[in-house]
Amino acid sequence: MIVCQDVSDPLNIGSLFRLADALGISAIYCCGQSPVPPNRRIAKTARSTHQWVPYHYRSTTTETLEELRIAGYTLIGLEITDQSKSLTESDFTTHQPLALIIGAESKGLLPETLALLDLAVHIPMYGRNTSMNVVQACGIALYEITRQLGTTGHWY
């Protein structure tokens, strides 16, 4: 499952639908300022995947995460923090079911969201820049998680 906190660009949301479909993600939660279908710009980049990947809109991320925790999900945030672990050094096979939480394009995850996470992970980067596009980052994280889960594990 993907949870989007204030990911405001419809083109990014559309691309996340394509990622979700490609990697077998069960659903997308769009929270706060994140747009949802029907939206022409989402449809353009989603390439019809928004028609079959389940999605939900929630006004607040914190309430969504609290509901997912009660339902048994491990909450994993994609954010560079002083306590985050490298994506490549994290074992996701012991944390099912999973929800990957991603933040806004410009500000990432909010402090109140970070406080609710079971784990924060970051992508090791070796260049001068310390950030990347939210969809690119999400794709890298989803690929690594899916690679670890393999055919024996699955997204819930």
Image: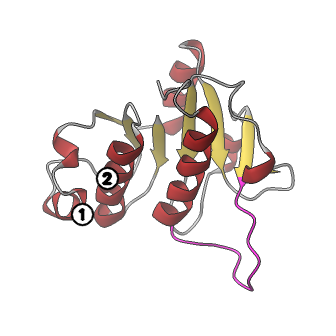
Cα gap from disc 1 to disc 2, whole angstroms: 8 Å
Tell me where residue 135 appears, x and y as whole percent: 46, 62
- Label pair 1/2, CB-CB below 8 angstroms: yes
Secondary structure category for the residue under label 1 = helix
Position of residue 58 in the picture relative to residue 122 (left or right): left
Tell me the chief SS of the magenta region: loop
The three-letter amino acid code for the residue at tag 1 is: Thr
Residue at the image point whose x is 60% and y is 59% from the top: 108
Q: Is residue 128 magenta?
A: yes
Q: Which residues are magenta?
A: 122-133
Q: Residue at x 17, y 64 (%)?
A: 44
Residue 45: which numbered mark, if any? 1
Q: Taking 111 as reference, is 44 above or below it?
A: below
Give the left or right position of residue 145, taking residue 139 as reference.
right
At label 2, which amino acid type do we have?
Answer: Arg
Residue at point 41%, 46% (across, down): 32
Residue 48 against residue 52 in the figure, above or below: below
From the viewer's perspective, is residue 134 above or below residue 118? below
66 up-or-down from 8: above or below: above
Q: Which mark is residue 110?
A: none
Crowding at label 2, few (<14), some or many (≥20) Cα neighbours within 10 Å?
A: many
Q: Can see residue 144?
A: yes
Indicate yes or no whether the magenta region holds residue 144. no
Q: Quadrant of residue 149?
A: top right
Q: Secondary structure at mark 2?
A: helix
Q: Which of the pair 101/123 is nearer the observer?
A: 123
What residue did someone put label 2 on? 18
